[in-house]
């Protein structure tokens, strides 16, 4: 099913990468006019680890 979703669509609506890359992707979305971003648990690590990573590395950088 993943092959049915074009890469450019994923690039616009899904965040992936290091915390720094995710921060940059979020900043680009905010610059384009978004006022809110919702996060799910990252894949490839435990739910607890993903929440910790978002809370410690990503969200503090996005505070306005």
Image (cartoon, grey):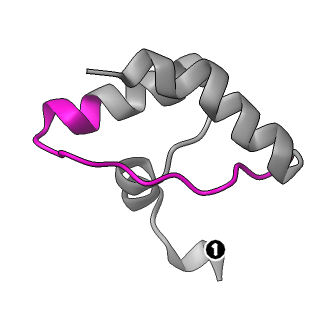
**Residue drawn at 87 percent across, 45 percent down:** 45
In the rendered image, residue 29, in percent from the top left (x then y), is placed at: 26, 39
Left or right for 56, reference 11? right
Residue 40 covered by magenta stretch = yes
Residue name at image x 21 percent, y 35 percent? 30
Q: What residue sits right under mark 1 in the picture?
A: 2
Question: Against 9, is 61 above or below?
Answer: above
Residue farthest along the left direction in this orientation? 33
Percent x, y of residue 60: 48, 19
Q: Horizontal and vertical percent for residue 41?
A: 69, 54
Residue 6's place in the image compared with 25, above or below, is below
Residue 37 position, x and y percent, is 35, 49
Label 1 crowding class (10 Å Cα cut-off): few <14, some 14-19, many 20+? Answer: few
Q: Is residue 47 left or right of residue 4?
A: right
**Magenta span dominant secondary structure:** loop
Q: Quadrant of residue 58?
A: top right
The residue nearer to you, when weighing 8 against 52, is 52
Query: Looking at the image, how many numbered discs can be counted on the residues?
Result: 1
Q: Quadrant of the C terminus?
A: top left
Quadrant of the rendered structure where residue 57 is? top right
The residue segment tinted magenta is 28-44
Specify whether 34 is left or right of 38. left
Front residue of this view, candidates 31 and 36:
36
Q: Can residue 18 be seen by looking at this rendering?
A: no
In the rendered image, the quadrant that contains the N terminus is bottom right
Q: Which residue in the rendered view is the most extreme toward the right?
A: 46
The residue located at (35%, 50%) in the rendering is 12
41 or 63: which is nearer to us?
A: 63
Local secondary structure at mark 1: helix
């Amino acid at each position: 099913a993943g092959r049915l979703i074009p890469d450019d669509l994923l690039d616009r609506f899904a965040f992936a990468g290091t915390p720094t890359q995710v921060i940059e992707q979020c900043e680009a979305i905010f610059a384009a006019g978004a006022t809110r971003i919702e996060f799910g648990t990252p894949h490839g690590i435990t739910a607890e680890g993903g929440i910790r990573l978002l809370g410690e590395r990503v969200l503090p950088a996005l505070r306005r």
